[in-house]
Image (cartoon, rainbow, N blue to C red):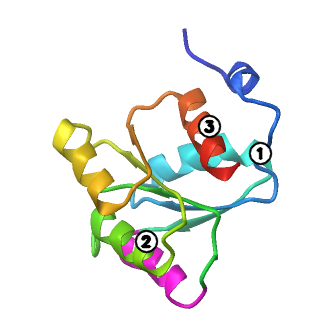
Amino acid sequence: MLKTKSNFKEGLKQTTFAGQKILVVDDDDVSFFLVNEILSSYSVEITRANDGYEAMEFFKYKKNPFDLVIMDIRMPKMNGYEATKRIKELNPTIPVIALTAYAHYQGKADCLTAGCDEFIAKPFDIGFLLNTIQKHLN
């Protein structure tokens, strides 16, 4: 059964994401717009970076520009592994969730080694994504 916007929210705990700042790093427009659509009803501030280099630049000049990062892995200029390593060097406490179609055992291991706090494979369960975000924002 396909989970709709109205029934996947029911599985979340009472805590909301309101006021949180989330950086979504993805070069694919469809993937970004899907995540943006899912999160848009939670009153969060969503910023997009089109590649890992752009994502890392946000952290170079400000220590805590975001509360959480959702990171794709395969991107131009700088991949998600390298971007995560660099972001974690600048801000070790920022939660990074890898959200990628690069979903095999070695890919997951590489994400975690790079510093990602969680790994979610595409296609993903919306409720699982929301619960994972909530886990790291609270």
**Prevalent SS, magenta region:** helix
Q: Which residues are magenta?
A: 51-62
> If the image is split into quadrants, where does the N terminus sit?
top right
Q: Position of residue 80 (x, y in %)?
A: 33, 63
Callout 2 crowding tier (Cα within 10 Å): few <14, some 14–19, many ≥20: some
Q: Amino acid at mark 2?
A: Lys
Mark 1 → mark 3, Cα distance in angstroms: 10 Å
The furthest residue to the bottom: 61
- The structure residue drawn at horizontal position 75% and vertical position 21%, both measured from the top left corner, is 10
Q: 71 or 117, which lies in front?
A: 117
- Whether residue 36 sits left or right of residue 73 in the image: it is right
Of marks 1 and 3, the one in the foreground: 3
Local SS, label 2: helix
- The structure residue drawn at horizontal position 26% and vertical position 38%, both measured from the top left corner, is 103
Q: Position of residue 96 (x, y in %)?
A: 48, 57
- Whether residue 5 sits left or right of residue 15 in the image: it is left
Give the labeled residue for mark 3: 130
Q: 10 or 85, which lies in front?
A: 85
- The structure residue drawn at horizontal position 67% and vertical position 23%, both measured from the top left corner, is 8
Give the labeled residue for mark 1: 42
